[in-house]
Amino acid sequence: MTPKQTTINTVTLTCSTCGSAQFTKLDTNEYQCSHCHAVTLVEDNVAQRLEKILRNIQAPQPAPMKTSVIAAISLAVLAAVLIPLAVSSFGSRTTSAPIRPSASPPIDASLVKLTDVQEIKARGRTQLVMIMRNETGRKIDVPRVTASFFQGELSLASTSGSAPARTLEPGEYTPLIISAPDKAYTRYDLQVGTPSPARGKNNDVAASQVQLVRNDGSYRLVGLIRNQGANAASSTRITVMLYGADGKLIGMGNGYATASPLAAGALTSFDARCEMLRDGEVASYDYMVQSES
């Protein structure tokens, strides 16, 4: 059989006679169609392409993997990736979550006592005057006190008041005034707000040479303040309470140390002016010195 150059389509590498793409190599550049047995001599570049095709055809092909096997492998790989990631994330959340300290129990407002309550009329206004005492056993910010006024069963206005002192140590006390409404009332209820723990730290200050003086019918408490601490003391406040012969509050006042801040070991003066709440002579007085950082 005489070889023909046209037996193989050099573009598609198929047999030009029968269209088969199956060939057998007979010799260098010589191939035979496996279907119609036509023999063809080809050029070198065509032979190279045919060699690649023949190698692919003759090489054993791997058996196709079943879908169920592919799914099982995919799940195994996914689990191997996700499970450590989930454990890592869970561990991260567990170890990094902040541990909140247990909250302190709320302070019982009933342990803030209101005593010596008086209704005092001054300059055409009625005021409720009282003493607030800290019996909570803890240092507290002075809570507000609300007075609710009634006329029989009819509710009238509610007003609040605050004390001149900012904080109270256990056992300390301070005066407090609440204005009453202009409309006549038959009774009132007093409600102490929830006390909160005081956060400020007390400075070590002390008063000396204290005396109550009276000029032109007005009272003033004067004296000296010394800073006995190692740090400067700022905003030193003096609260004054004046009492009548009956032992009830008759006047009150407050003032500040002249020097502020007051250096460690330094000495300064104070002058606290007082206001009379009702007529009468002052039989005794009390005062409280407070300085916080």
Image (cartoon, rainbow, N blue to C red):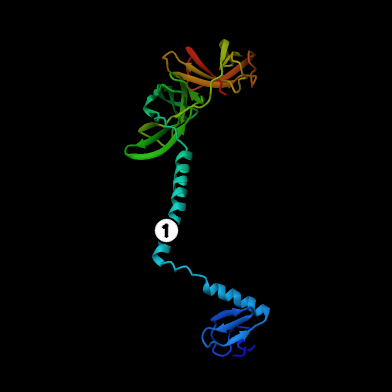
The residue type indicated by label 1 comes to Leu
**Image quadrant containing the N terminus:** bottom right
Q: In which quarter of the image is residue 222?
A: top right
Does the image show residue 255?
A: yes
Residue 182 lies in quadrant = top left
Q: Residue furthest left?
A: 153
Instruction: Kindly indicate the quadrant of the structure image that contains residue 249.
Output: top left
Name the residue at 47% across, 31% down: 161
Per the image, label 1 sits on a secondary structure element best described as helix
Residue 127 position, x and y percent, is 45, 29
Q: Quadrant of the C terminus?
A: top right
Q: Which residue is more in the foreground, 36 or 197?
A: 36
Q: List x then y, in percent, for residue 192.
A: 40, 30
Left or right, 201 with reference to 64: right
The residue sitting at 46% across, 23% down in the picture is 139
Residue 9 appears in the figure? no
Residue where numbered disc 1 is placed: 75
Q: In the image, what residue occupies the spot 63% across and 89% down?
A: 4
Measuring from the top left, give residue 30's x and y in whole percent.
Answer: 62, 82
